[in-house]
Image: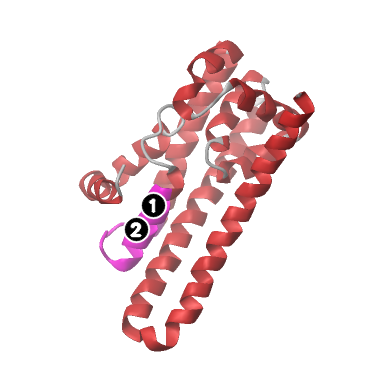
Amino acid sequence: MAIIHLVSLIEHYGYLGLFVMLMLEYFILVVPGETALTTTGVLSRSGVLHLNIGWLIVVTALGTFVGSTIAYGIGRICGRPLLVRYGKYVGLTEKRLASSERMFQKHPWVILIVGKYIAVVRDIVPYLAGINRTSLRVFIPLNLLASFMWTATFLALGGVIGGLWKFVLHHWQISIVPAVIVVVGCGYGYWLLKKRMHAALDHERSLEG
């Protein structure tokens, strides 16, 4: 989905559109959650969207929480065969499922929280939690915590980028270098986290091979 269409959707449907978008990510990839959240943060901070940041965090966190909880239920009720058959629609191959299962079984608490920050892995984790019959007393609070942490992080990142952009427009001669450093630093930190997670998944695949 092009950014201009994303902006139009958010402007038209507001909080409800964001809730549905984040919820559907676990079943059909409408738009990557990070993109939706960061873009919303930028536009809100820039004044293009008049949405309250507190409500944005609550609504988007509940959207991803509801979607992932439904995915947990599907995994628990339908089991692994359904994921193998239909997982391709969310980027889930059988090999990726197998390696993710091994990681989840070793570090379920860590994966429930850290996995939220990794595209594709985020969509797989709740299904794995259901397949492995993770207790709801564990899954619900950790999933809720991870949902609020994840959405707040990317909305805040978008807000920082939006604020820097406004500042640079007015003081570009003195602020362009530090602004670029901050943005590049944030991007590098997120890339490093993704790289480490995917390296761990590749290691699990090599053990299987």
Q: Nearer the viewer, residue 179 or 14?
A: 179
**Please, what secondary structure does the residue beneath circle 1 have?**
helix
The residue shown at (48%, 73%) is 180
Q: Which mark is residue 56?
A: 1
The residue shown at (32%, 60%) is 43
Q: Nearer the viewer, residue 126 or 180?
A: 180
Q: Which mark is residue 177?
A: none
Gap in Å between the C-alphas at discs 2 and 1? 6 Å
Is 198 left or right of 91, judged from the image as shown? right
On the image, which quarter does residue 171 sit in?
bottom left
In the rendered image, residue 45 lying in the magenta stretch gets the answer yes
Crowd rating for badge 2 (residues with CA inside 10 Å; few <14, some 14–19, many 20+): few
Verify CB contact (< 8 Å) between mark 2 and mark 1. Answer: yes
* Disc 2: which residue: 52
For the stretch drawn in magenta, what is the main secondary structure? helix
Look at label 1 and name its amino acid. Leu
**In the image, residue 111 lies at what x, y percent?**
67, 38
Range drawn in magenta: 35-53
Q: How many marks?
A: 2
| Quadrant of the drawing holding the N terminus | top left
Figure check: 183 above or below 12: below
